[in-house]
Image (cartoon, helix red, strand yellow):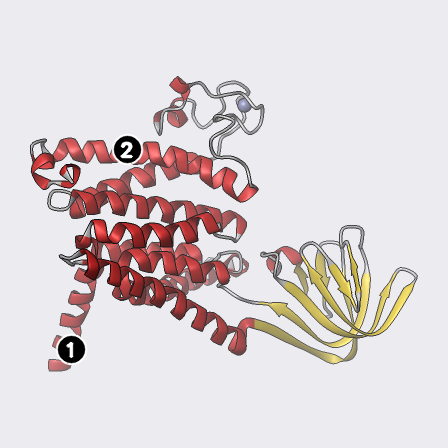
Amino acid sequence: MAMFDPEVWAQVPFHFWSCAFFVFGTAVGSFLNVIIHRVPRGESIVSPPSHCPHCQYAIPWYLNIPLITWLWLRGRCAHCRAPISPRYFLVEFLTGVLFLLAWWRQGPEHPGVALILCLFMAGLVAATFIDFEHFIIPESITFGGMAAGVLLSPLAPALHGKTSAADALLSSLVGMGAGCGLVYGILRGGKLLFGRKKIALPPETTVIFGEESLKLPEEEIPYGEMLYRDSDYIEAQAKKAVLGEEVFENVRVRLYKDRLEIGEQTLDPGPVTHLEVVTDRIIIPQEAMGLGDVFFMGAIGAFVGWQGVVFTLLGSSLVGALAGVTLIVLRRLEWSRWIPYGPYLALAATVWVFAGPELVNWLLRWGERGAGG
Ligand SMILES: [Zn+2]
């Protein structure tokens, strides 16, 4: 393909392409903002055109310039002056920087690989910000990412350090399999080991499911800290459950974000402000990873191969541990329950793409020197 021929790219100065990649990145970042806002809400990403979420003012093209518009208007809507989240600026800037890094890392020799890395980075940015806000990674990103990684790898074998299309395709498929398989294994293992937290209570303890929180004798836990995903639930085997006039005996009670199950009955939890449950044990969710992370890691693996998968998993657990320690130091431990795992994976995968092999070599040499004495 002429477009990917390094000769063609070499005719234009390196720094011109650096600027072009950064500017292109900010424009893609602007589009990612639309995806981050609309995809989890099930809205179309093409229509209506960009508008202010507060006053619905349709943003004209000259006020839709990445980075500059947000700075120029000091983070406010041009029409109603309502504040526009700094996330818009951050995503544009971050995407610009990542595209620039992709060019610096691969560009002059492998422009095709640089472009594929840009697409990969765009997917990671969208997944990170959606996961932060909604605790999900949309299937369009996870499954779309797996398909893109597998289809693009043979077009630019250097992405996997290969010279033949067949070898690159194999690397991509193995990476995807390793990504899905390892995270699924961790998820299953984790569920068995510490996936759900059992709180043992004295016999015949009365627990109250209040309007906004679960009230235990010793503590009160807001539902928001326990029920992030639609599949999360709080469970108690109730000796007795009292809801208004109704009394149930020996039933299983489960509270989900959107429904309350008492024995065979399913109710809307909205109007329930006080449910008394007599029990000796309550089980609450405590999982960092969800099924979305299985496919997300599969998509990452399709781009980075199995070595990248191993690095990303180890790296993400290190970043997660550091974040946990930082939050403890800052006395913001409750925040840690709010951080989904996807962003850690995305960060570790980004480190792998731009510095992973060097980092591994450096660690190995350091280890050898240590062992040698
Ligand atoms: Zn407005």
Quadrant of the image occupied by residue 115: top left
Image-based side of 284 in relation to 245, left or right: left
Secondary structure type for disc 1: helix
**Residue at far right of view:** 245
In terms of sequence position, does the residue under pointer 2 or pointer 1 come before the other? 2
Q: Amino acid at mark 2?
A: Phe
Measured as percent of width and height from the top left, residue 157 is found at: 18, 54
Which residue is drawn at the image coordinates 43% and 35% (left, top)? 88
Measured as percent of width and height from the top left, residue 365 is found at: 13, 71
The label on residue 370 is: 1
Measured as percent of width and height from the top left, residue 363 is found at: 19, 68
Crowd class of label 2 (few under 14; some 14 to 19; many from 20; radius 10 Å): some
Measured as percent of width and height from the top left, residue 148 is found at: 33, 49
Which residue is drawn at the image coordinates 45% and 48% (left, top)? 140
Name the image quarter holding the N terminus: top left
Would residue 86 be seen by someone viewing this image from the given angle?
Answer: no
Pick the residue in front: 3 or 124. Answer: 3
The label on residue 80 is: none
Cβ of mark 1 under 8 Å from ligand 1: the answer is no
Cα distance between the residues tagged 2 and 1: 45 Å
Whether the residues at callouts 2 and 1 have beta carbons within 8 Å, the answer is no
Which residue is drawn at the image coordinates 51% and 25% (left, top)? 51
The label on residue 24 is: 2
Q: Amino acid at mark 1?
A: Gly
Which residue is drawn at the image coordinates 7% and 32% (left, top)? 11
Image-based side of 5 in relation to 41, left or right: left
Pick the residue in front: 154 or 180. Answer: 154
Quadrant of picture, ligand 1: top right
Quadrant of the image occupied by residue 347: bottom left
**Is 106 placed above or below 305 here?**
above
Image-based side of 278 in relation to 234, left or right: right
**Is 44 placed above or below 80 here?**
below
